[in-house]
Every structure is written in structure tokens, then in C-alpha cells.
Image (cartoon, rainbow, N blue to C red):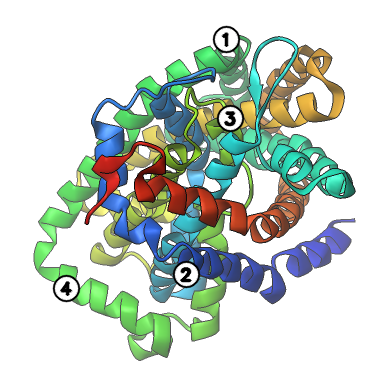
């Protein structure tokens, strides 16, 4: 079974999938007139100006972004970057950057469509995301495509965003402090359960408190390490760019890390980290209290920028500057080794980071899965889903998850395909709404640079 799923997974995340992901991002970026790059400053001003949003919705736009980031800033930012650079050489980080630059357009389009085509359920909550903009935007002919996304979305989270995350926490606490996995699993079950049983309001409030603090703390510690090696930064960046196009053999020490390996692992880990194109983040943004899809799209694209171009870059530079990349270790252990090489007790940075990042990922993704269940079964499915989600946490903490990881990774790819098809087919709607907004038809004179 594992061999069969491994083959399916290799196909699901093979060249065609990566071309579809990057191609969709490039197409949307060009179609939007590079709006996601040119309006980046405006998006930050919108967010930092106390943007609270006006109109229907469950939570403020800022909290929608934090809920989204709680799901995306996870172990991928610590272990995923290290794995990509181990398998693909330093150049993998460059391809992660490129994936994020074009991924911003996908995240923008997802949020625009999520707000435009969202619905209100019979309990008054707002539901949106790929399944809704497929059904409401493309029509009944595509109903099966929407249901397919919802089915895979409701299942995939139990792997990559639940059991695997709890397992990562159990492993790191066991290695560092000899905490038994059963205690870790029980503690996580209580903490996550207390949050998600309170619904989107409690999830968003928790994410808004924890995510900024943990991301800022991690970036500050990374800056400390970088500052200690500041004179090596230009050479490190030069090596990253050179390896992206010439292969890691040009700098020595990374046997077999060809240009293709850098592209393959950089793109794959970049998408895994920021989830642009997977269709998960727009489920959170659909709950935002706003009647303006474009503004929420601008806020949403910041998630990809922060996740990959800030947090992942910090991890990658720390690994490069401390010289541990060719040490023979990988994953979170490599990142821990990098911090430990420069800061006494630096391994604790990674330990705390894994615990917090994984916990918030479990919380954020629970909402994604729940909304998929609501689409398929209505609001009567909410409580059973939440109970199953909480009960799966300690199971993951003490189980060998090799097969579960493969299945969930494959389901993630199957989620992305319906979403990417919808983004391409509904791109004229995104382009039209964006042009109307920046022409001033939606009362946004402050967004004009003319």
C-alpha cells in the first residue's frame, strides 16, 4: 500500500502539477498587471492602518489573515526549508522565493473569489472557499468539482495539519525534554479542543494573539544569528542565486543537488509552506467582515509574502550562514543545529517554534476542514467533525505516520487541482473586480498612485 501511494504521490506532485501551480501564478500575475507586486505597499498600509472592514462577515479582516497564517506558518517554515535545501541545495531557497512572488497572485485571487461568492449557513456563519466559488461562480455543471475539493479538503487536514503536526511536537519535546508522547498528545488535545470548540470567533482571537507574537519572535532570533554573521550575507545570497541556475556542485559539498533538484524541492516546499494555490486560505478569508473582495485579496496576499519571503528566508539564511548545511542532518534537526551553532541554547528557538507553529496549524486547519464538511453535509456535521479532529491529535502524537503523511500529501495535491481550474476559469472575474476597484468605482481613491 505504501509503495502504491508513494507512486501516486510522485505523480500528483510531479512536473505537470508544478507547472500548473507556477503557470497559474504567472498567468494571474500578468493578467493583473503585476498588481500584487506594485500594490504590496498599499496592502501593508491597509493592514497596518487598523483596517477593520465594513459589511457582513464573522471576523475582522486582520483576524482572517491571522487565521490563515496560523495554518500556513507551521513546521514547513522550520523543517520544510531545511529539507528543501538539503535535497535541492542552497538554490532551492531561490525557487521558494520565486514560487512566493507568483503565489501572491493566486492567494489574492482566491480571497477575492472567496468573498465574492461566499454564503451564509443556517447558523449565521459565513462559508466560502473553492467549493463555493466553483458552485456559485462556474454554475451547476461544475458542482462535482466543488464537491471533490470539499471531500479532499475535509480529509487532508487530518494528515498534514493534525496528526503529523502533533507527532512533530511529540518528537521535539521527547528529544529535548524526554516528555512522553502520551502527555504531549493529551495536552495538545485539551488546548486545541478548547479553542476550536469555540468556533471561528475563538480560533480567530487566538490566532490574532499568538501568530504575530510567535512570527516576530522567530524573525528577531533569526536576525540575531544573521547579525552575528553579517559579513557573510552577500556571499550567502550569491551562493543561493548561483546554485539556483548552476547547481550546487558549483559551490561544492552537495552531491547530486542539480538545478532540477533545486527547482523541484524549492517549488514543492514553497507551496507546502505558503499553501498558495491549494485553496485552503480563502476558506478563512471568506469569513472576513467586509463587502470589498479586492481589499481582502490584498490582505490575503500578505500571508504568502510573510510566510515565505520573510519567515522561510530567515530560516534559510540562518542555515546558510552557520555552515551546517553539509552536516548530514536534515529537517528540524538541521535548523536546530544552525541556531545552536550561534546562540547558546539556540536549539530551544526551534523547539518552541515547532510547538507553537504546529499547534496553531492544527487550530487553523480545523476551520478549513469544518467548512468543507459544512459544504458536504450542512451544519449538522460541525460538532462530529470537531470531536473527531480533537480525538485524532493524541493518535498522531504516538503513531508512525509515514503512510498517513503520504496519503495526506496526495490529498493536498488533489485539493489543489479543482482550485487551480477554478482560478483559471474565473480569472476574468478577478481581473474585472480589480480594475473596477482601482479605477475608483469602489471608493478607494487612496489606493491610486496616479
SS for tag 1? helix
C-alpha span from label 4 to label 2: 31 Å
Image coordinates of residue 271 in percent, x first then y, are 55, 57
Of the residues under marks 1 and 3, which one precedes in the sequence?
1
Front in this rendered view, residue 1 or 380: 380
Which of the two marks, 2 or 1, is nearer to us in this view?
2
Front in this rendered view, residue 393 or 275: 275
Q: Is residue 222 above or below residue 206?
A: below
C-alpha span from label 2 to label 1: 44 Å
SS for tag 4? helix
C-alpha span from label 4 to label 1: 46 Å
Q: Residue 30 got which mark?
A: 2
Q: Which residue appears at 71% of the width and 25% of the height? A: 370
Q: Give the side of residue 372 with respect to residue 358, left or right.
A: right
C-alpha span from label 3 to label 2: 34 Å
Q: Name the residue under label 1.
A: 194
Q: Give the side of residue 48 with respect to residue 19, left or right.
A: left
Which image quarter: residue 393?
Answer: top right
Front in this rendered view, residue 369 or 33: 33
Image coordinates of residue 5 in percent, x first then y, are 84, 59
Of the residues under marks 3 and 4, which one precedes in the sequence?
4
SS for tag 3? helix
Of the residues under marks 2 and 1, which one precedes in the sequence?
2
Q: Is residue 431 visible?
A: yes
Of the residues under marks 4 and 1, which one precedes in the sequence?
1
Front in this rendered view, residue 96 or 435: 435
Q: Mark 4 points at which residue?
A: 234
Q: Name the residue under label 3.
A: 362
Q: Is residue 292 above or below residue 94?
A: above
Amino acid at each position: 500500500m505504501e509503495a502504491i501511494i508513494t507512486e501516486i504521490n510522485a505523480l500528483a506532485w510531479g512536473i505537470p502539477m508544478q507547472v500548473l501551480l507556477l503557470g497559474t501564478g504567472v498567468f494571474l500575475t500578468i493578467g493583473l498587471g503585476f498588481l500584487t507586486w506594485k500594490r504590496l505597499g498599499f496592502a501593508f498600509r491597509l493592514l497596518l492602518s487598523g483596517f477593520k472592514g465594513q459589511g457582513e462577515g464573522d471576523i475582522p479582516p486582520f483576524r482572517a489573515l491571522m487565521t490563515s497564517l496560523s495554518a500556513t506558518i507551521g513546521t514547513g517554515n522550520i523543517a520544510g526549508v531545511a529539507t528543501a535545501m538539503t535535497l535541492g541545495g542552497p538554490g532551492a531557497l531561490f525557487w521558494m522565493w520565486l514560487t512566493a512572488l507568483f503565489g501572491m497572485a493566486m492567494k489574492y485571487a482566491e480571497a477575492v473569489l472567496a468573498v465574492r461568492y461566499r454564503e451564509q449557513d443556517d447558523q449565521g456563519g459565513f462559508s466560502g472557499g473553492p467549493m463555493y466559488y466553483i458552485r456559485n461562480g462556474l454554475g451547476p455543471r461544475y458542482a462535482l468539482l466543488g464537491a471533490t475539493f470539499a471531500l479532499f479538503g475535509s480529509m487532508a487536514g487530518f494528515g498534514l495539519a493534525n496528526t503529523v503536526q502533533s507527532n512533530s511536537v511529540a518528537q521535539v519535546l521527547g528529544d529535548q525534554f524526554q516528555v512522553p508522547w502520551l502527555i504531549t498528545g493529551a495536552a495538545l488535545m485539551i488546548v486545541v479542543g478548547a479553542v476550536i470548540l469555540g468556533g471561528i470567533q475563538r480560533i480567530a482571537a487566538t490566532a490574532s494573539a499568538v501568530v504575530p507574537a510567535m512570527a516576530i519572535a522567530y524573525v528577531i532570533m533569526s536576525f540575531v544569528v544573521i547579525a552575528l554573521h553579517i559579513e557573510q550575507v552577500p556571499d550567502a545570497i550569491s551562493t543561493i542565486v548561483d546554485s539556483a541556475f548552476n547547481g550546487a556542485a558549483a559551490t561544492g559539498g552537495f552531491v547530486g543537488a542539480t538545478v532540477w533538484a533545486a527547482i523541484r524541492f524549492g517549488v514543492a516546499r514553497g507551496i507546502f509552506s505558503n499553501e498558495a494555490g491549494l485553496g485552503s486560505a480563502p476558506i478563512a478569508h471568506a469569513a472576513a467582515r467586509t463587502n470589498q473582495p479586492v481589499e481582502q485579496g490584498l490582505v490575503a496576499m500578505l500571508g504568502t509574502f510573510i510566510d515565505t519571503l520573510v519567515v522561510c528566508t530567515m530560516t534559510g539564511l540562518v542555515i546558510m550562514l552557520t555552515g551546517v548545511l553539509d552536516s548530514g542532518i536534515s529537517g528540524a534537526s538541521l535548523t536546530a543545529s544552525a541556531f545552536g551553532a550561534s546562540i547558546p541554547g539556540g536549539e530551544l528557538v526551534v523547539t518552541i517554534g515547532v510547538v507553537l507553529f504546529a499547534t496553531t496549524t492544527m487550530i487553523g486547519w480545523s476551520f478549513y476542514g469544518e467548512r468543507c464538511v459544512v459544504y458536504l453535509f450542512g451544519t449538522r456535521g460541525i460538532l462530529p467533525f470537531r470531536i473527531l479532529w480533537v480525538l485524532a491529535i493524541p493518535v498522531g502524537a504516538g503513531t508512525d505516520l509515514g503512510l498517513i503523511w503520504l496519503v495526506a500529501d496526495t490529498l493536498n495535491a488533489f485539493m489543489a487541482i479543482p482550485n487551480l481550474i477554478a482560478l483559471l476559469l474565473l480569472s476574468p472575474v478577478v481581473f474585472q473586480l480589480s480594475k473596477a476597484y482601482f479605477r475608483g468605482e469602489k471608493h478607494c481613491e487612496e489606493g491610486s498612485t496616479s
